[in-house]
Image (cartoon, helix red, strand yellow):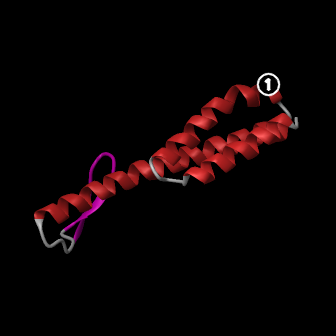
Amino acid sequence: MYLADTSQFRYYVGHMANSKSAEKSHKSALKRRVFNIRRARTLKSSVKDMLKTIAGGDKATAEKNLSEMYKAIDKAAKRGVIKKNTASRKKSRIAKRIASL
């Protein structure tokens, strides 16, 4: 086994796949994993930025950035990185915090 490195992801070549289709499936799963990790990182950073803005007490900026945060949460939920109810709960709690500013 050795580690193959492409521009976007790494994957192990020579794993114990029983068929060509299993190898292809493994390779595409690793590609999906990279996209999911990227989506989760975007979600986490956008929520964290929003919480910092709220902690600073800047309601105008928070309302302006709210749609960007909603977009990151909805994309993560759409692709299965987080569940639909989790996305809804995150959006609701942050909207409630902004309203209380």
**Residue that appears at 18% across and 65% down:** 22
Q: Is residue 12 magenta?
A: yes
The quarter of the picture where the N terminus appears is bottom left
> Which amino acid, by three-letter code, is at mark 1?
Ala
Displayed quadrant of residue 26:
bottom left
Q: Which residues are magenta?
A: 1-13
Displayed quadrant of residue 59:
top right
Relative to residue 69, is residue 48 depicted above or below?
below
**Residue that appears at 71% across and 39% down:** 50
Displayed quadrant of residue 47:
top right
Percent x, y of residue 78: 48, 45
Percent x, y of residue 32: 35, 52
**Residue that appears at 80% across and 41% down:** 96
Q: Main secondary structure of the magenta part?
A: strand
Q: Which residue is mark 1?
A: 60
Percent x, y of residue 5: 27, 55
Q: Is residue 62 magenta?
A: no
The quarter of the picture where the C terminus appears is top right
